[in-house]
Image: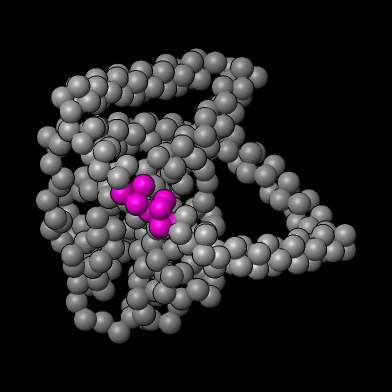
């Protein structure tokens, strides 16, 4: 840490004076200063580290984007990572950027949590499009799973799963570095180069270019027909029914999650461990589905 003022704030963080540290950092986000921006984001991440791993991880990643070899930020970013925290991306439309400090925050915040500035107005809660319904319902499921994942017994189960994954990764890395694996890698690269050359040669042929033009024209025609189809009354009615079905589905998912948490709280011994491991796996599956559905990174 190069900056004296940020070093003093880090000392407050280590001493548990988080509120004072958070207030002191606002001057570095709203006024002129000579502190490196990557260090400011790292110290902000340290303020959030114990209470909010998802926000801390975002801030450490911001620091690394500004200085890729920032070892301390890399170390803490790795300590934030887990499947359940990965459910939240600060680069989607539920995390707008503050107009003052430029950092992304959760859209339900009344003020920017970093610099304290007033935030942009919230999205219209009366938006009843199917996209908005799915987005809100999906976030409710994410919030329920995140709350479940913060429990101590679930954290212990997560650590065991992560440890097993690290061992598997070590074995895979050892195998990948073997002489035989290197030989196969070189052969695969050579085959890939030949495939690229063949594909390029094929794409330059006249008949292929003509086919591409025809496909483009067909695509435009299909788009026009799809737009006209979507404006029909019976289609709009079907979309309304789909909205209602989607809301009912997500309500059932939430009820199921609450019931499962009650079962875990009541269970003991091996039965409790089985239920926890099952929900860790469910969390990973939900992560993959939501990232694909909502376009997360």
Snapshot colouring: one colour
Total marks placed: 0
Q: Is residue 86 above or below residue 18?
A: above
Between residue 59 and residue 223, name the one nearer to us.
Answer: 223
The quarter of the picture where the N terminus appears is: bottom left
- Is 210 displayed left or right of 273 in the figure? left
Residue at image x 61%, y 24%?
273
Residue at image x 43%, y 44%?
291
Residue at image x 76%, y 52%?
172
User: At which x and y percent is residue 295?
Assistant: 39, 47
Residue at image x 29%, y 20%?
245
Residue 79 lies in the magenta stretch:
no
Between residue 51 and residue 231, name the one nearer to us.
Answer: 231
Residue 49 in sight from this viewpoint: no
Q: Quadrant of residue 173?
A: bottom right
Stretch of the chain drawn in magenta: 212-220
- Is 19 displayed left or right of 266 in the figure? left
Q: Is residue 102 above or below residue 51?
A: below
Residue 217 lies in the magenta stretch:
yes
User: At which x and y percent is residue 149?
Assistant: 46, 35
Between residue 240 and residue 221, name the one nearer to us.
Answer: 221
- Is 64 displayed left or right of 229 in the figure? right
- Is 275 displayed left or right of 167 in the figure? left
Residue 169 in sight from this viewpoint: yes
User: At which x and y percent is residue 265?
Assistant: 48, 19
Decide whether the magenta segment is chiefly helix, strand or loop.
Answer: helix
Between residue 5 and residue 80, name the one nearer to us.
Answer: 80
User: At which x and y percent is residue 130?
Assistant: 24, 32
Q: Residue furthest bottom?
A: 34
Q: Is residue 219 above or below residue 194?
A: above
């Amino acid at each position: 840490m190069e900056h004296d003022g940020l070093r003093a704030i880090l000392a407050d963080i280590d001493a548990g004076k988080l509120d004072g540290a958070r207030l002191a950092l606002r001057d570095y986000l709203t006024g002129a200063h000579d502190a490196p921006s990557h260090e400011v984001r790292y110290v902000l991440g340290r303020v959030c580290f114990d209470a909010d791993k998802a926000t801390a991880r975002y801030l450490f990643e911001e620091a690394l984007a500004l200085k890729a070899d920032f070892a301390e930020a890399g170390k803490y970013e790795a300590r934030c990572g887990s499947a359940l925290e990965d459910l939240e991306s600060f680069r989607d439309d539920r995390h707008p950027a503050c107009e003052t400090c430029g950092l992304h925050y959760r859209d339900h915040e009344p003020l920017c949590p970093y610099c304290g500035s007033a935030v942009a107005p919230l999205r219209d809660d009366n938006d009843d499009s199917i996209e908005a319904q799915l987005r809100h319902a999906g976030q409710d499921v994410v919030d329920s799973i995140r709350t479940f994942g913060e429990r101590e017994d679930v954290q212990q189960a997560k650590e065991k799963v992560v440890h097993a994954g690290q061992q598997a990764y070590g074995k895979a890395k050892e195998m990948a570095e073997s002489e035989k694996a290197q030989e196969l890698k070189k052969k695969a690269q050579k085959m890939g180069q030949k495939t690229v050359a063949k594909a390029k040669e094929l794409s330059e042929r006249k008949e292929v270019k003509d086919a591409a033009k025809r496909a483009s024209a067909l695509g435009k025609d299909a788009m026009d027909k799809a737009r006209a189809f979507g404006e029909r009354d019976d289609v709009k009615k079907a979309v309304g029914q789909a909205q209602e079905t989607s809301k009912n589905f997500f309500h059932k998912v939430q009820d199921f999650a609450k019931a499962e948490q009650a079962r875990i709280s009541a269970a003991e011994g091996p039965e409790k461990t089985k239920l926890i491991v099952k929900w860790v796996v469910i969390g990973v599956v939900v992560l993959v589905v939501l990232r694909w559905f909502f376009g997360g990174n």
